[in-house]
Amino acid sequence: MECYNCGIVLGKEKICPSCGVDLRIYRKFVGISNFLYNQALAKAQTRDLSGAVADLRLSLQYNKVNTNARNLLGLVYYEMGEGVAAVKEWMISKGYQASENLASEYLEQTRKNPAEKDRMNQQARKFNQVLTYCRQDSIDLAVIQLKKLLNDNPKLVRGWQLMALIALSQENLEQAKKALRNAERIDNNNPLTIRYQKMLEHLEKKGAGRKQKQSQSIRYSNGNDTIIQPKLRRNTGSMGIVLNILIGLIVGAAITSFLYVPGIRKKAVSDANQAVTEANNTIADKNQTIKALEEEISSLNAKVDSESNKAKKQKEAAKSVDTLLKAYDAYINEDIELAGDYLESIDASDLSADSLSVMTTLQEKVNQQYLSVTYDAGMDAYNRYRYTEAIESLSKVVSVDENYAEGEALYCLAQAYRKSEDHEKAIETYAKVCELYPNSSLSYNAERYITELQETIENNR
């Protein structure tokens, strides 16, 4: 026995030594459940299957994890022809106890025989179809389908009971008696079977089923003997014979038109509906399969995209690391400008924490030298009237530090833009000088150049 709270194996303790819960009531429930299981086992051995089902259900109410009771309930259902219900109980039992459980063997036998599984599903559908026919008052079709079902599954107690009920409704007492005998042979104490037997006895006492025979015979007594003889019909002559033949033909045609033909039509419609239902079930199964495949394809595509993005990021990270190595190599070779260019082109988000730390350290060492060398190159180009080269170098300096050389780098960049006649860029850069260094000579000159350039732009329009 296991603790219902923590699952440890118990002895005779009244309090769980692990979690401390009170086990007295739980032990009573388990004891009642086991008592009902043993009682159901005894009933099942005497073929009181319905009584065993009632006890087992009650046993599971007291202890739902009593796998012995649930397995036995499945076996009883299977013996009563309820294969689907049996498999359901075994699957629940396996869910509670995955190992060392007889339910696993029962389910494995079902899986090894796919035909048996299909047969159980077909029988369940056929029985539901019989019930549908009965609700539609298509009794003939219901009887035909039910006979086929009972030929395939002669242990189906519910099927024999339904056959008996149909026969009782039609006062076909012999067929009802036979069906009830078959039901009793499988389950000898079924309450519904006993109820139908009482209905049968009541109808027999009323004389149902013998009225037609009695109306076609004459009963009289001769001493102690009772004599039954057919009624004699009066000789009606040749005209009567012809008239009876005509009446018989008319009655036969009427019976064919009103009874036989509608039955055929109803059966045809029913067969068509059943075919449509089976086709819809097939389509639904295929649609489900297609949907599952589409979901699998979508999942695989997502994985492919994820792996592709991961590979792309790894490629970019490798490229950034390679650029970092080039920057370090340039720094070692004292090519500070090239090292700074490499560092500027690196995307820090592509680097790992260690690589980012190396880059930060290298930037701290390179930046000052890089800015100095690049600024000198830009000013040299500016003084030599090579404004394109000046713009290229001074832009690099400003992108790192706008305040470099106390604004001289930014101001000379604006001057280079103006002298290369890039008026828009010049105005934008002069405005930046005014913003960073208000009330200075640089700002004064920048404002003057902005006004001149704006007038030039207006005049050129």
Image (cartoon, rainbow, N blue to C red):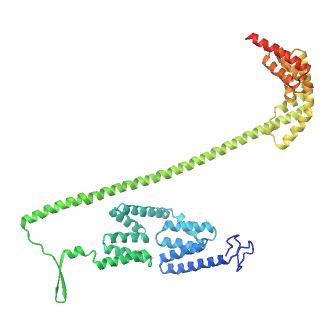
Q: Nearer the viewer, residue 131 or 403?
A: 403
The correct choice, above or below, for 285 with respect to 103 in the image is above
Q: Position of residue 342 (x, y in %)?
A: 84, 31
Q: Is 64 located above or below residue 436 in the figure?
A: below
**Above or below — where is 71 with respect to 39?**
above
Q: Find residue 306 and report its image quarter.
A: top right
Q: Quadrant of residue 247?
A: bottom left
Asked if residue 4 lies left or right of residue 285, the reply is right
Q: Nearer the viewer, residue 461 or 98?
A: 461
Nearest to the observer: residue 110 or residue 378? 378
The tally of labels here is 0
Q: Could you tell me which residue is drawn at 75 percent across and 10 percent down?
A: 460
Instruction: Evaluate whether residue 335 shows in this view.
Output: no
Quadrant into which the C terminus falls: top right
Residue at (78, 18) in percent of width and height: 424
**Coordinates of residue 363 in the picture (x, y in percent):** 89, 35
Q: Is residue 455 above or below residue 33?
A: above
